[in-house]
Amino acid sequence: MNLNKLIEFVKDIFFGISEGIKSRTIDTIEAELKDMEGAFGLLLFGSLIGMPIFSSFVGVSLLPYIEREIITMLSRSKMLDDFASYWFEIADI
């Protein structure tokens, strides 16, 4: 009986560790996704800030498909003055 409780306790510990690792991994992947979305938007619409990388035709052709990314970029651009909070959010501090 006591051995079963010990086994369950060890299983709970390993379950907690694995859930923590999964949570941290998901946070890291989401942060990388945000960076990739920003780079993608910059590649497509770099001409708006004076860096023509692709032709305007490519950006306009993809416009119907990237509506969510544009909304994300616009909402994120409103918070660009607070870089520290962005990195603290990524670090989960």
Image (cartoon, helix red, strand yellow):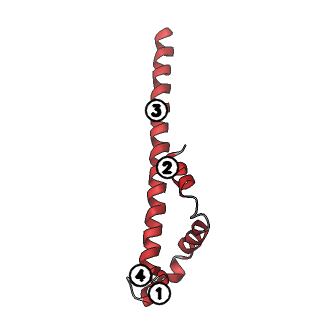
Q: Secondary structure at mark 4?
A: loop
Q: Which residue is mark 3?
A: 17
Q: Which residue is mark 4?
A: 51
- In the rendered view of the protein, which quadrant contains the C terminus? top right
> Tag 2 or tag 4, which sits nearer the N-term?
2
| Disc marking residue 61 | 1
Label 4 and label 2: CA atoms lie apart by 31 Å
Residue at x 49%, y 37% (from the top left corner): 20
Q: Residues within 10 Å of mark 3 (few under 14, many from 20)?
A: few
Nearer to the camera, 88 or 40? 88
Label 1 and label 3: CA atoms lie apart by 46 Å
Label 4 and label 1: CA atoms lie apart by 18 Å
What amino acid type is highlighted by mark number 2?
Asp
> Tag 1 or tag 4, which sits nearer the N-term?
4
**What is the residue that sits farthest to the top in this orientation?**
2
Nearer to the camera, 57 or 11? 57
Nearer to the camera, 90 or 17? 90
Q: Secondary structure at mark 2?
A: helix
Residue 5's spot in the image, x, y percent? 51, 15
